[in-house]
Image (cartoon, rainbow, N blue to C red):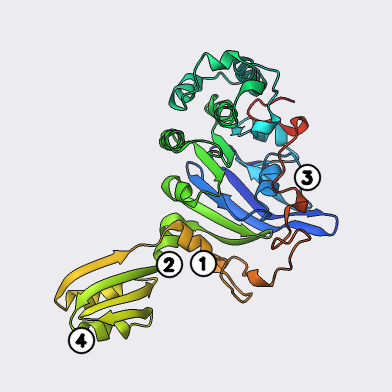
Amino acid sequence: MTAHLSDAAAIETSDLRKRYGPLTALEGLDLVVPRGTVFGFLGPNGAGKTTTIRLLLGFIRPSAGSARIFGLDTWSEGVAARRALGYLVPPEALYLDMSGDDQLDYAARLSGTPPVLRDRFLDALELGRGPLRRRLGTFSKGMRQKLALVMACQGDPELLILDEPTDGLDPLIQRAFESLLRERHRAGRTIFMSSHDLAEVERTCQRVAVVRAGHLVVQDAVADLLRLRRRTVDVRIDDAGAGAILALPNATRLSREAGRLRAAIDGDLNPLLRILALHDISDLSIESPTLEDAFMAFYEPAAAGPGPNGTAGVALTALPPASDGTTGLGSELGDDDVFTREVVTTAGGPR
């Protein structure tokens, strides 16, 4: 029995697996994307991100496990599941002989929803009405990306699935699009996005999942991931205070000279703050980690074993090189390939 749309998570996968012959593209993926969140899906090329998105959209069948959109199975109930979502069609899959206006109208007809946000997105992304009368074949890469974003978002879907949404956009337009995402988030929409721009993810997402070679490495709130990472403390403090700081089990000395201590603090800052409160300090700075710092930490050499929050540990450095020299499964699984026109069925793309 399927869950009612209002009761279910926006996205939920259970032991989701996908194999291509002897190669495993996705291995036991368990994801939960709560309704109303902006969720970042991260990983290097070949990690399984695009395979996951194809499974979520019902474009390919799982080898095992399940994927659900608002409680609806994406394979057996795919048509119903896709009614609630908008998907970013790769610019390469657009019909280049169509005008921009015709493409947007065609997308709206296929999705069956009125384009209530079309003008809002066209204006914010600075895609003028004049260019929309031209054939898409005359558009630059950035203009096609803007058009694809408008196609995905114009019907105000409950769920947006965006694969590299700001690829090819200049920084000002990228920030404008991030502002649009925040608007949709405030309106209660759910946004699932993959991106290589970790600063963008940090600015826009509340939760993230990191995958590597088909395995889930971590799934957590961005704020919690950042709190767990290493901070750098630079403080002018007396010798007794410096000694107390360096005695902390989560402190590592970086440098100490002329009454100044520079140390790395892993995880909880409260023990450090208690020490600082007991001593005179004349200068203090604490450098917070970025999402990029946290992301890269999950790719440092590590032994296999239990991972954070119960996720499977992965011996990342033990992965064999692919035939093209990359680590992991590589691009032979098609993780970086664009969707063909035959499978572009969401957000009103050509079919």
Quadrant of the snapshot with the C terminus: top right
Pinpoint residue 24: horizontal percent, then vertical percent: 77, 58
Q: Does label 3 or label 1 sit earlier along the sequence?
A: 3
Pinpoint residue 51: horizontal percent, then vertical percent: 70, 48
Q: Is residue 257 rendered to the left or right of residue 18? A: left
Q: Does label 1 or label 2 sit earlier along the sequence?
A: 2
Kindly identify the amino acid type of the residue bearing the numbered disc 4. Ala
Q: Looking at the picture, does residue 86 appear above or below residue 233?
A: above
The reply to whether residue 56 is visible in this rendering is: yes
Kindly identify the amino acid type of the residue bearing the numbered disc 3. Arg
Quadrant of the snapshot with the N terminus: top right
> Could you give the CA–CA distance between mark 4 and mark 1, rounded to whole angstroms?
32 Å
Indicate which disc residue 229 carries.
2
> Could you give the CA–CA distance between mark 3 and mark 1, rounded to whole angstroms?
33 Å
Q: Quadrant of residue 4?
A: top right
Q: Do the residues labelled 4 and 1 touch (CB within 8 Å)?
A: no
Q: Does label 4 or label 3 sit earlier along the sequence?
A: 3
Q: Nearer the viewer, residue 292 or 137?
A: 137
Residue at point 71%, 18% (across, down): 97
Kindly identify the amino acid type of the residue bearing the numbered disc 1. Ala
Indicate which disc residue 240 carries.
4
Circle 3 sits on which residue? Answer: 61
Q: Looking at the picture, does residue 94 appear above or below residue 34?
A: above
Residue at point 73%, 52% (across, down): 331
Q: Is mark 3 on a helix, strand or loop?
A: loop
Q: Looking at the picture, does residue 161 appear above or below residue 101?
A: below
Q: Is residue 257 rendered to the left or right of residue 132? A: left
Q: How crowded is mark 3: few (under 14 residues within 10 Å), some or many (20 or more)?
A: some
Q: Quadrant of residue 83?
A: top right
Pinpoint residue 7: horizontal percent, then vertical percent: 54, 41
